[in-house]
Image (spheres, rainbow, N blue to C red):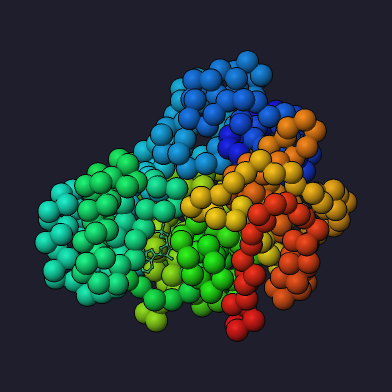
Amino acid sequence: MKVFIVGSGGREHAIAWKVAQSEKVDKIYCAPGNAGISEYAECVNIQAMEFEKLVNFAKEKEIDLTIIGMDDPLVGGVVDAFEKEGLRVFGPRKNAAILEGSKAFSKDLMKKYQIPTAAYQTFEEAEEALKYLNTVNFPIVLKADGLALGKGVLICNNLEEAKNGVKSIMLDKQFGAAGNQMVIEEFLVGREVSVLSFVDGNTIKIMTSAQDHKRAKDGDKGFNTGGMGTFSPSPFYTKEIDEFCKKYIYQATVDAMKAEGRSFQGIIFFGLILTEKGPKVLEYNARFGDPEAQVVLPRMKNDIIEVMEACIDGTLDNIELEFEDNAAVCVILASDGYPEHYEKGFPIDGLENFKEKEGYYVFHAGTKLAEEKILTNGGRVLGVTAKGKDLKTARKNAYQATEWIDFKNKYMRTDIGKAIEEA
Ligand code: AMP
Ligand code: GLY
């Protein structure tokens, strides 16, 4: 069959790599893709928000299945655009992708269906939000309602910081229209875990756990980024926690969406925090995590096409997800200065070192091909993933593999997965 992937990051590279292993697949296209993805897929120059062009391309090439990797097109309704033309597509419709697209929606859903989350209030007027700040304890968390490239969350330590935060979100529109509404919520303390799942509207199947490192610098310092590295599984995600989440969070979310007339088909990514009072949901995403996909997919044994088709057909209860009994660590190689100012366009050396090395992967995030040379083309440039029999070994292998790659202004955190040594 012919598969079409929409997106251009490390996540889509990991998806393309996994799709390429399916015996059902003869041909892969990707829009817009990147230099790494072009090893498995024919990349086409259509942007993820150009719905009409994407749909026309899928019709013209007689694509059997389109997979949407990114949040923006999902929240914007790309799945509805494909379905309207009778095309098969993996991902939630617009009315379900709102689970990620609006924090006010997801908080209200959790409250209504008693899914554990931080206490909160939503605001449509800056004045009301500013007034409310006089009644809260610090630190406090401010969230722009809509999508903001993972950057719309501000943790404020005092009243002055919080007031400035509300003004920048709601009045100065630092995150654009995402700040038309905002959520102010209780600050929670605990370890974070990312749990991804496949959902067919009724049934939910949980993948192995992972943990992201969102801050730019070692020791969780510096700005929030899209994610600087991941490991999987998380040793903090114990059997007891898994049982609790299965009972109170996972199926409850799927059922709540169904009850609201917003049946969810695709990936639900649960951003959990393990507090003293039990696991709570920090956020939902409606797609694979980036870089969570880069550690979860290499450990997945199933044919991903079979699982995705079961989500579309409502037959996921027939599928048993299986993961290797090992571990994986992904270290992001970024351009120094990310997520603020950085330079790009530098040649990348050493990519060939990953060829035919079992258990080692280099996923491209921001790269481009120019005159036969692969150049840096973004803040997050590459994700270097390695597997190992346990997390410690995977971590050692991943850091060793980061040395095979060289480019000007190469930057990485040196403590990805270090927390596992304390576990
Ligand atoms: P989100 O996009 O909602 O996951 O938020 C981004 C990051 O902000 C999370 O991964 C957490 O590190 C942090 N965060 C969000 N909400 C809270 C909260 N209620 N308490 C503490 N940290 C939070
Ligand atoms: N790594 C976090 C995310 O994909 O949102």
Image location (x, y in percent) of residue 335: 61, 52
Question: Looking at the image, in which quadrant does ligand 1 appear?
Answer: bottom left
The residue depicted at 76 percent of the width and 54 percent of the height is 406
From the image, which quarter does the N terminus lie in? top right
- The front one of 93 and 232 is 232
- The front one of 413 and 83 is 413
The residue depicted at 63 percent of the width and 15 percent of the height is 60
Image location (x, y in percent) of residue 234: 59, 71
Image location (x, y in percent) of residue 317: 57, 51
Image location (x, y in percent) of residue 91: 51, 39
Q: Residue furthest toward the right?
A: 356
The residue depicted at 65 percent of the width and 26 percent of the height is 44
Q: Is residue 345 visible?
A: yes
Which quadrant of the view contains residue 322? bottom right
Above or below, 202 relative to 274? above
The residue depicted at 49 percent of the width and 25 percent of the height is 50
145 sits to left or right of 79: left
Above or below, 88 relative to 241? above
- The front one of 168 and 288 is 168
Q: Is residue 114 visible?
A: no
